[in-house]
Image (cartoon, helix red, strand yellow):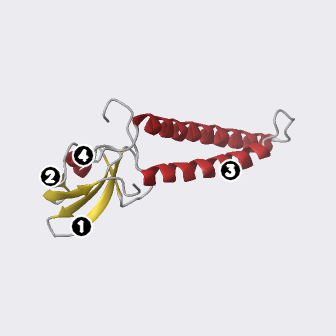
Amino acid sequence: MTGGPDPISAVAREAFERDLTDLRAEREKVAATLRGGQEVGDRGDEADELERANQLEHLDTRIREIEGRLHEAAAAGPPRTDEVGVGSTVTVRFDDATETTVQIGTVTEELDRSMVTADSPLGSALLGRRAGDTVTYETPDGPASAVVLSLGDAQA
């Protein structure tokens, strides 16, 4: 997003670390089921072995991605608190007077209502803004606006 390493919030870091722990445990289980060069039985056994090997490769790839993102975030340091950027935690008030706190991220894999991607309409409108700024963005129902009430890492 910014051309350099992007920070992440403490909440996002914890979520990545939990995912990493879960993925490593799952990888261990899958690796234990592989025969490691031993002769397999019939074609069904071969297909099963191939499926587990593919699953192991997928887990390894995801583990490397998360480790890389955590390393990048460590190099970037904490999210900024003077203006909205990737990793920021932002409290906004919408036109209907509701207030919500969101985190600006790069990717959200699960339905997480507190995460707003930096390339979404609201996320991109918030980038570079400061407390007190009003942003406008497009929604499926037309233009909307929100006021930036505060920003900062929720876990700081």
Q: Amino acid at mark 3?
A: Ala
Q: Amino acid at mark 2?
A: Val
Front position among marks 3 and 4: 4
Tell me the number on the disc at residue 135: 2
Q: Residue at x 26, y 49 (%)?
A: 123
The reply to whether discs 4 and 2 touch (Cβ–Cβ < 8 Å) is: no
Q: Is residue 97 left or right of residue 151?
A: left
Q: In x, y percent, where is residue 25?
A: 68, 50
Front position among marks 3 and 1: 1
| Label 3 sits on residue | 25
| Label 1 sits on residue | 99
Q: Residue at x 32, y 29 (%)?
A: 3
The C terminus sits in image quarter: bottom left
The residue furthest front is: 156
| Label 4 sits on residue | 82
Q: Is residue 32 left or right of residue 80?
A: right
Q: Earlier in the sequence, mark 2 or mark 3?
A: 3
Q: Earlier in the sequence, mark 3 or mark 4?
A: 3
Q: Earlier in the sequence, mark 1 or mark 2?
A: 1
